[in-house]
């Protein structure tokens, strides 16, 4: 009896671990898309480094959408986490560049890895 | 002939190399993303982020720990790589935001310095303006005082009129009052008048004064010229004797050449017999305009009657 439940649970766990059963990360997708949009609106495309991260975020979002269509929701979720992280960096770089401009300084030379 | 390695050997070498890589990246070897994340966090930790964005730095640390945990559970999965990737970005984020804060602080500081500088300049300008204004006001006061002293001469009867001309302030002294007809010696009574004039000139400081003698048209031209010169000299000599510096006053006779009234009437002739004292305007000195007195202010004591000592102050015209 006990062992049967354990087997059941293990089976459930396996299903969960396998990509098939995970719910589509729609919320994270929305967040990532909003972040990319915000980055563009704040002028991330004018700042080379920010533009790079914005593009990486966009690519990750696109990849995540494809994975979601393929029902690879877990992988899609991971991809969206990357997208969000890049979008945040793009936003921060844009703000930094603006602060630099207000000081009348040259754009930053140092490049983030 | 064939120095190039054959395709077969090349492929074998490639396989060997790949195998080597795989072996090297065994269970204990972290994926590149995790190595990057560790470096990025270390970098952020050693930056100003520790002071300026500690919360963001903490997030980055949590993120890195999550990646490390995932790695210890399962060495090389998509999850480990993503977590590490996110941890790298978070570390960068902490550093960038610290940099932004630093820039903003510097901007505020610069703004403050600029405002201070501006305030300083403004205060200086204001000070200069006030000094100029004070100087101007002093100058005006001096001019007003000078004008007042001349006008007083007219009121007290020492002179018959005062007027402003381009060349300066012209004070007219009646020849009839000063001299016996046809003579250039001063009447004794004229001295009282000229004493007042001398005082007024001394009040004017170093202003150049010209004494100009004029006659009416009776008598010969030569005689009139000589008489006018002698009368001007006489006035000048007396004023010098009353303390006016010699170099400050000059005399010249103009004869009958510049009448100010009709020579056909006795009254007109009396007006034409005169000595004018011209107080030369200093270069750049503005013509004094007293309120209520239009363009050519003229104060006149009328009529110039001979042989009269003090008179009632004459009203302004």
Image: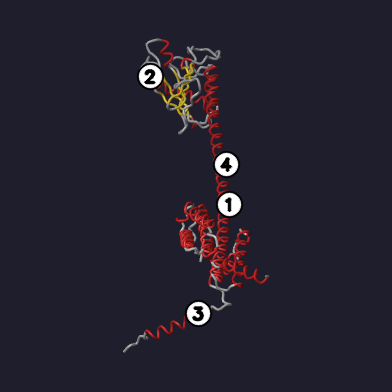
Q: Residue A42 in the image: x percent, y percent?
A: 49, 52
Which is more toward the observer, A4 or B80? Answer: A4
- Please give the residue where the numbered disc 4 appears in the rendered image: B123
Q: Do the CB atoms of the residues marked 2 and 3 lie less than 8 Å apart?
A: no
In the rendered structure, are the residues bearing label 3 and label 4 in contact, judged by CB atoms less than 8 Å apart?
no
In this view, the mark in front (2 or 3)? 3
In this view, the mark in front (1 or 3): 3
How many C-alpha atoms fall within 10 Å of the one at disc 1: few (<14), some, or many (≥20)?
few
Residues at marks 1 and 4, CA–CA distance in whole angstroms: 21 Å
Residue ID for mark 3:
B21
Q: Is residue B220 left or right of residue A82?
A: left
* Residue topped by disc 2: B256
Q: Secondary structure at mark 3?
A: helix
Badge 2 and badge 1 in a common chain: yes
- Nearer the camera: disc 3 or disc 4: 3
CA gap between label 2 and label 3 equals 126 Å
Crowding around mark 3 (Cα neighbors within 10 Å: few <14, some 14 to 19, many 20+) is few
Q: Are marks 2 and 1 in contact (CB under 8 Å)?
A: no
Q: Earlier in the sequence, mark 2 or mark 3?
A: 3
Q: Is residue B132 left or right of residue B259?
A: right
Mark 4 or 2, closer to the camera = 4
Mark found first going from the N terminus, 1 or 3: 3
Q: Chain of mark 2?
A: B
């Amino acid at each position: 009896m006990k062992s049967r439940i354990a087997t059941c649970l293990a089976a459930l766990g396996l299903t969960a671990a396998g990509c098939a059963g995970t719910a589509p990360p729609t919320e994270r997708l929305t967040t990532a898309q909003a972040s990319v949009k915000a980055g563009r609106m704040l002028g991330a495309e004018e700042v080379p480094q920010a533009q790079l991260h914005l593009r990486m975020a966009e690519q990750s979002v696109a990849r995540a959408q494809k994975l979601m269509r393929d029902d690879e929701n877990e992988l899609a979720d991971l991809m969206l986490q990357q997208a969000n992280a890049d979008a945040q960096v793009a936003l921060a770089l844009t703000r930094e560049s603006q602060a630099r401009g207000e000081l009348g300084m040259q754009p930053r030379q140092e490049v983030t890895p | 002939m064939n120095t190039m390695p054959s395709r077969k050997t090349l492929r074998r070498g490639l396989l060997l190399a790949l195998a080597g890589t795989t072996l090297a990246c065994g269970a204990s070897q972290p994926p590149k993303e995790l190595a990057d994340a560790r470096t990025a966090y270390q970098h952020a930790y050693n930056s100003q982020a520790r002071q300026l964005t500690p919360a963001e730095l903490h997030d980055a640390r949590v993120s890195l720990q999550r990646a490390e945990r995932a790695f210890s559970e399962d060495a090389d999965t998509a999850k480990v790589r993503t977590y590490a990737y996110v941890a790298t970005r978070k570390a960068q984020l902490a550093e960038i935001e610290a940099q932004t804060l630093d820039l903003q602080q510097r901007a505020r500081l610069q703004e403050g310095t600029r405002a201070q500088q501006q305030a300083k300049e403004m205060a200086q300008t204001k000070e200069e303006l006030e000094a100029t204004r004070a100087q101007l006001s002093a100058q005006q006061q001096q001019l007003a005082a000078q004008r007042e002293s001349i006008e007083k001469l007219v009121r007290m009867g020492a002179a018959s009129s005062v007027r402003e001309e381009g060349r300066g302030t012209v004070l007219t002294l009646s020849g009839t009052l000063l001299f016996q007809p046809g003579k250039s010696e001063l009447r004794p009574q004229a001295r009282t008048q000229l004493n007042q004039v001398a005082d007024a000139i001394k009040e004017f400081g170093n202003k150049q004064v010209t004494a100009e003698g004029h006659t009416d048209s009776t008598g010969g031209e030569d005689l009139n010229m000589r008489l006018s010169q002698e009368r001007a000299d006489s006035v000048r000599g007396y004023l010098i004797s009353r303390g006016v510096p010699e170099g400050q006053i000059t005399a010249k006779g103009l004869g009958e050449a510049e009448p100010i009234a009709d020579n056909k009437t006795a009254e007109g002739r009396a007006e034409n017999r005169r000595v004018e004292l011209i107080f030369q305007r200093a270069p750049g000195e503005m013509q004094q305009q007293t309120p209520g007195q239009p363009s050519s202010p003229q104060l006149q004591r009328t009529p110039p009657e001979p042989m009269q000592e003090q008179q009632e102050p004459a009203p302004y015209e």
